[in-house]
Image (tube, rainbow, N blue to C red):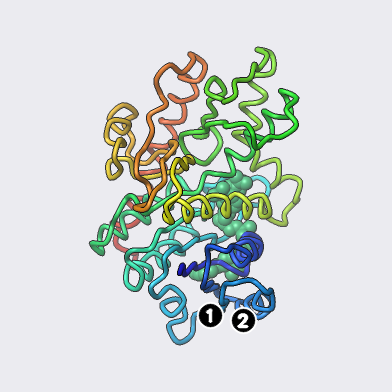
Amino acid sequence: MVKAVVAGASGGIGQPLSLLLKLSPLVSELALYDVVNTPGVAADLSHISSNAKTTGYLPPNDGAKAAFKDADIIVIPAGIPRKPGMSRDDLFNINAGIVKGLIEVAAEVAPNAFILVISNPVNSTVPISAEVLKSKKVFNAQRLFGVTTLDIVRAETFVAELAGKSNPQELNVPVIGGHSGETIVPLFSKVTPSVTIPDEKYDALVNRVQFGGDEVVKAKDGLGSATLSMAYAGYRFAEKLLKAVAGVKGLVEPSYVYLPGIPGGKEIAEKTGVDFFSVPVELGPNGAEKALDILGDITEKEQKLLNAALEGLKGNIKKGVDFVHTPPQK
Ligand SMILES: NC(=O)C1=CN([C@@H]2O[C@H](COP(=O)(O)OP(=O)(O)OC[C@H]3O[C@@H](n4cnc5c(N)ncnc54)[C@H](O)[C@@H]3O)[C@@H](O)[C@H]2O)C=CC1
Ligand SMILES: O=C([O-])CC(=O)C(=O)O
């Protein structure tokens, strides 16, 4: 019996993500929370003849608490998306407060839930989430995930295109670091089965993975950012986690996590100098069972990308942590 919650369920990501979760045999109860439209989205999905009992909640009458109560997994795509010309960090002023509020509710009524944060800027919203959970004394790093799966999905797609592979999903393309521009670090030297990226195509491929989000923002021309590919990516991560929790072994996916709280993570935090970082994570009944160090033997070019990523990440992390500890302006 798994209760899943989507917070931001009426949005561009929220609706298709809720559809995928409604179809999952792993989910028995699906609670949809948003500030608008959830009764309609829930009524619509509830007519699908799959297992999950689907309900919608709005803010009145403590709707968030009712939606989140005793959840096993809470997926958060709530908040505003980018328009052309904006960076993910430009979303901070609005989305930081939204995520903080939702995590406060989760801490109170579902302190053991796995929490998957999609809302941008992920580099900062995950530190915000950790700090809120710490302040409520219910933080378990093994249960908090920043969803960076879309970077992996894009990398698989673009590498397969370049290498002439017909099925991108047969490729494993590790992408580490954070989730914005230069903080995204694809490790093409570690692709399995291995591929050869011609030297003259390397920079453009890295750039496409790092700025794939901008490609979609530009194409949508003011109407938002990636939603359908993100719903797929969010579902892919959630499904892997739920399978691992149910006992399936050997499931690994990169995620942006609090390294010092995860077995194997402390060493990576010491090496990189950052506490929040995306690395391949072995999933299991407790969530993130192990952070895998794949930083050894990376190429010189990858080391340069990593150095640039770490610079950017430090500021993003500090901004998130400070946000939780700075008293609101009067
Ligand atoms: N992690 C990743 O790889 C990706 C993250 N994103 C991020 O996901 C977020 C959502 O994107 P979209 O779905 O396209 O935006 P959207 O605007 O279509 O949907 C967001 C939803 O959040 C709801 N919302 C706002 N405040 C809320 C609150 N306090 N509680 C509950 N719901 C609330 C809105 O009513 C809306 O339905 C954005 O911040 C975007 O940047 C988008 C793509 C990829
Ligand atoms: O680009 C954006 O703002 C949305 C996002 O995170 C992505 O598509 O990777």
* Of 289 and 108, the residue lying toward us: 289
Instruction: Name the image quarter holding the C terminus.
Output: bottom left
Give the CA distance from mark 2 to mark 1. Answer: 8 Å
| Label 2 vs label 1, nearer the camera | 2
Relative placement, left or right, of 22 versus 62 is right
Quarter of the picture containing the N terminus is bottom left
Q: Amino acid at mark 1?
A: Leu
Q: Which residue is mark 1?
A: 58
Marking on residue 39: 2
The answer to whether one can see residue 183 in this image is yes
Q: Residue at x 53, y 62 (%)?
A: 26
Q: Position of residue 310 (x, y in %)?
A: 41, 31
Residue 96's spot in the image, x, y percent? 44, 58
Q: 164 left or right of 256? A: right
Up/down of 92 relative to 293, above or below:
below
130 vs 184: above or below = below
- Residue toward you, 92 or 212: 212
- Type of residue at label 2? Pro
The relative height of residue 183 versus residue 30 in the rendered view (above or below) is: above
Residue at x 41%, y 30% (from the top left corner): 311
